[in-house]
Image (cartoon, grey):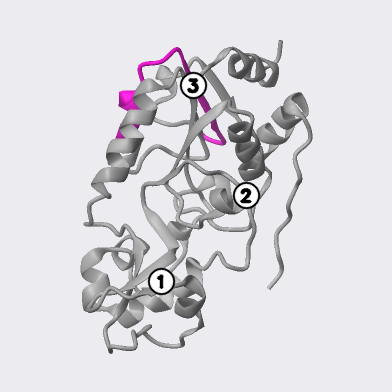
Amino acid sequence: MNKIEKLAQIMKDSSNIVFFGGAGVSTESGLKDFRSKDGLYHEKYDYPPEEILSHHFFLENTKEFYKFYKDKMNSLNYKPNITHYVLAKLEEKGLLKAIITQNIDGFHQMAGSKNVLELHGSILRNYCMKCNKFYDAEYIFSKEDIPKCSCGGIIKPEVVLYEEPLDNEILKQAVKEISKADTLIIGGTSLNVYPAAGLINYFQGKNLILINKEKTPYDNKCNLIIYDSIGKVMEALDEKIGNTKKCTRKDG
């Protein structure tokens, strides 16, 4: 039995599967991740990306923040990929109970997943810091300068920046979902970003599965590891559970 067959068998024998994903889930849609050799953190900017994406930088250098944000964080010209669609199908079949994601692109919901916990927020939700009026992502990315509300206030993406706390309710729900899962599938994440990565410690189930291109700090806790592209693994898994509509990157 190869690893894909073993994964399929584990899922068949499980009653409560939770998926925990990171940037690697969306790179096959065309987006860049952060920490890989081709990721954003290895590109050259006037400021380190970790600083640009921090709370204090947003407040003190809002124009520079938005310059980077619009250039590098805009996922509106991309679409969900095979991984998002396979996960949505697994949820529809009743196999997958929840998706916990560190991504902010909204692709899981676009693919049809319902129970998605976004640890780091979403680019799709934006609010005026003065009057709390909602603005969609199209409005934000269409503005040449700092996006302003009709009241004159600065609009901030509902994205968790460095130095900001995670939403407590989402965090509590994520802990609850992981704690009651009998199988936890970790995919496309280095497990180096905290407190998100620390959620893995709440898993008390039987099967801890890792699908990632590189090793992580949690490898020794897993009972099945597949070092490969998560899209390739999900496509192979899809053959075991029926064909899923594939989606390619949208030009633009």
Q: Is residue 52 left or right of residue 116?
A: left
Quick check: 211 above or below 128?
above
Determine crowd level at label 2: few under 14, some 14-19, many 20+ residues with C-alpha closer than 10 A.
many
- Residue situated in front as seen by the camera: 101 or 169: 169
Is-magenta flag for residue 205?
A: yes
Quick check: 119 above or below 230?
below
Residue 217 point in image, percent of width and height: 38, 29
User: Which kind of residue does numbered mark 2 sit on?
Assistant: Ala
Residue 224 point in image, percent of width and height: 54, 18
Sequence-first disc among 1 and 3 = 3
Q: Which mark is residue 111?
A: 2
| Location of the C terminus (image quadrant) | bottom right
> Mark 3 sits on what residue?
16
The residues colored magenta run 198-214
> Mark 1 sits on what residue?
45
The CA distance from mark 1 to mark 3 is: 43 Å
The mark tally for this picture is: 3
The CA distance from mark 3 to mark 2 is: 21 Å
Q: Residue at x 47, y 74 (%)?
A: 70
Residue 99 point in image, percent of width and height: 48, 38
Determine crowd level at label 3: few under 14, some 14-19, many 20+ residues with C-alpha closer than 10 A.
some
Q: Residue at x 51, y 51 (%)?
A: 37
